[in-house]
Image (cartoon, coloured by chain):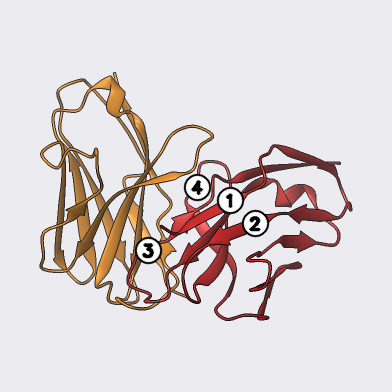
């Protein structure tokens, strides 16, 4: 079945550091790919998405490119802030769009001033 | 953007009590809703999928008599934890979408603590 693998955390960075959180997937066909963010005590918020190969999703300085050849959707940000501290989940939706999201295990990011 | 409201955000109750959690889509018609459970520092575990007007489809290992799901309208789904016990304490999150469309939109979650 479909699956998502993302790098284990926690990740601790200093403010203004460069962030990469790796995400790879296994799926048939052409899934849609997502990054969600969860702040402490809250639900999940959609951060960005990409629905086809070579699409780049971007939001709030974060970006990720849908790489079909490497089945990857790595999350990057050039300069993190303390307010970016949260748990980040990579997820995919099967090609049909009718199945629930499949989530990675989440990566906890802590940014220190 | 699409908004999903979940209520209550925090519940503390005695063992043996039944607890109802509501999930509402505020500005779109959610043909499909999902209920997840999240343990501390872990990912989301899908409990069940419900389509409006149909019985919920439960994931393997989830007791349907324990976790009652009702999706009677296009904007409301409820999860009732019946005769809750301390092991049911968890963070429950609902999610909603229009069937066949992405993304899923999430509520803010309900923290359930059973004493």
- Residue in the picture at 15% in, 33% down: B18
Residue indicated by mark 2: A23
Image disc number at residue A42 = 4
Q: Earlier in the sequence, mark 2 or mark 1?
A: 1
Tag 4, which chain?
A
Closer to viewer: mark 2 or mark 4: 2
Using the rendered view, name the quadrant where residue B88 is placed: top left
Residue B76 vs A56, above or below: the answer is above
* Tally of numbered discs: 4
Closer to viewer: mark 1 or mark 4: 1
Left or right: A28 in relation to B114: right
Closer to viewer: mark 2 or mark 3: 2
Q: Are marks 1 and 4 in contact (CB under 8 Å)?
A: no
- Residue in the picture at 32% in, 76% down: B98
Q: Which of A67 and B45 is in front in this view?
A: A67
Which type of secondary structure does the marked residue at label 4 adopt?
loop
Q: Earlier in the sequence, mark 2 or mark 4?
A: 2
- Residue in the picture at 17% in, 38% down: B63
Q: Which of marks 1 and 4 is nearer the N terminus?
A: 1
The residues bearing labels 2 and 1 have C-alpha atoms spaced at a distance of 6 Å
Q: Do the residues labelled 2 and 1 touch (CB within 8 Å)?
A: yes
What chain is colored orange?
B
What chain is colored red?
A
Image disc number at residue B4 = 3
Residue indicated by mark 1: A5
């Amino acid at each position: 079945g479909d699956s998502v693998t993302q790098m284990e955390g926690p990740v601790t960075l200093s403010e203004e550091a460069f962030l990469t959180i790796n995400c790879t997937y296994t799926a048939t066909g052409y899934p849609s790919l997502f990054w969600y963010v969860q702040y402490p005590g809250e639900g999940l918020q959609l951060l960005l998405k990409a629905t086809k190969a070579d699409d780049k999703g971007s939001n709030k300085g974060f970006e990720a490119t849908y790489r079909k050849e490497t089945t990857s959707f790595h999350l990057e940000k050039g300069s993190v802030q303390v307010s970016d501290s949260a748990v980040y989940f990579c997820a995919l939706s099967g090609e049909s769009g009718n199945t629930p999201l499949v989530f990675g295990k989440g990566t906890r990011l802590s940014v220190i001033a | 953007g699409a908004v999903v409201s979940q209520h209550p955000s925090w519940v503390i109750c005695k063992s043996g009590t039944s607890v109802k959690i509501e999930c509402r889509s505020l500005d779109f018609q959610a043909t499909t809703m999902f209920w997840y459970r999240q343990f501390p520092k872990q990912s989301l575990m899908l409990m069940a999928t419900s389509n409006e007007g149909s019985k919920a489809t439960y994931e393997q290992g989830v007791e349907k008599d324990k976790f009652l799901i009702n999706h009677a309208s296009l904007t409301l789904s409820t999860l009732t934890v019946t005769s809750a016990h301390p092991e049911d304490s968890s963070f429950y999150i609902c999610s909603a979408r229009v069937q066949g469309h992405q993304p899923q939109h999430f509520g803010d979650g309900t923290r359930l603590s059973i004493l």
